[in-house]
Image: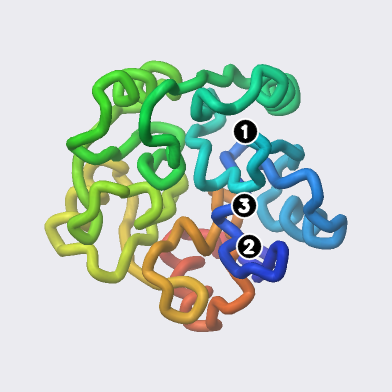
Amino acid sequence: MSITRLSLYGNTNIGAFTFATDAFALVPPDMPDGALKEFATTLGVPVHKATVGGSVLLGIFMAGNSRGLILPTYATDEEASSIERSVGVPVALYDGKKNALGNMILVNERVALVGKSMDPALKRLVSEHLSVDLYEGTIAGLEMVGVCAAANTRGIVAHPLATEEELSFLGKIFNTPVDVSTVNCGFPYLRVGLTANSNGAVVGEDTTGPEMARIESSLDLSR
């Protein structure tokens, strides 16, 4: 199945707790075995357990792709080393005031979008460490673009209030189709409620059938 519903800790914001690329995924250490198996099967990649600064909010605090990961500097050396060994890609630490990196950065294997006011040092780190073309912009007028959309190599699903100009820009820079949807029965911040790669998507359990169909279509997961 290319898309499935899951919750964690009784919480439907599955994307806040999990992270995925086209090569691997990361989940909290106490994710139940049944949910872990379904998560791995849906996304079709090896799944590893991790924390960031002792937190299970992996989707909030990390950003990256199959070539690298960026964590906030309060991640411990042990956590960074363990993640690096598990997934086999280099981990960089960002020392800045804002640490919700997953909320700030929309990235796939080739391209990243960030807000114009982002720290220039972080912009350079994203571009160089993840080996992506970097662009600046907004989604739904918001600079926290990472939380407002989900992207893979086949498509993007974005905040329902994204403007036509923003959607056109997204399609141009990522060179993929773009559409809008919500998750978890009307929640507009897509990335909080879903984790996706080019193989599949895991959405929160409150996500409706029409929302699932829209997300599946937007990310071109029906192949």
Residue at (46, 56) in percent of width and height: 191
Left-right relation of 199 to 73: right
Query: Disc 2 on helix, strand or loop?
Result: loop
Kind of residue at disc 2: Ser
Kind of residue at disc 1: Gly
x%, y% of residue 219? 46, 58
Residue 53: which numbered mark, if any? Answer: 1
Dividing the picture into quadrants, the one containing residue 104 is: top left
Question: Badge 1, how many Cα within 10 Å: few under 14, some, many 20+?
Answer: some
Name the residue carrying label 3: 17
In primary-sequence order, the first of circles 1 and 2 is 2
Residue at (44, 18) in percent of width and height: 129
Name the residue carrying label 2: 2
Query: Disc 1 on helix, strand or loop?
Result: loop
Dividing the picture into quadrants, the one containing residue 37 is: bottom right
Kind of residue at disc 3: Phe
x%, y% of residue 106? 37, 43
Tell me whether circle 1 and circle 2 mark residues in contact (CB < 8 Å). no
| Alpha-carbon span between mark 1 and mark 3 | 13 Å
x%, y% of residue 87? 69, 27
Question: Badge 3, how many Cα within 10 Å: few under 14, some, many 20+?
Answer: many
For the residues carrying marks 1 and 3, which lies nearer the camera in this image? 1
Q: Quarter of the image for the C terminus: give it.
A: bottom right
x%, y% of residue 143? 24, 47
In the displayed structure, 209 sits above or below 150; it is: below
Farthest left residue?
165
> Along the line of sight, which residue is nearer the eye, 201 or 125?
125
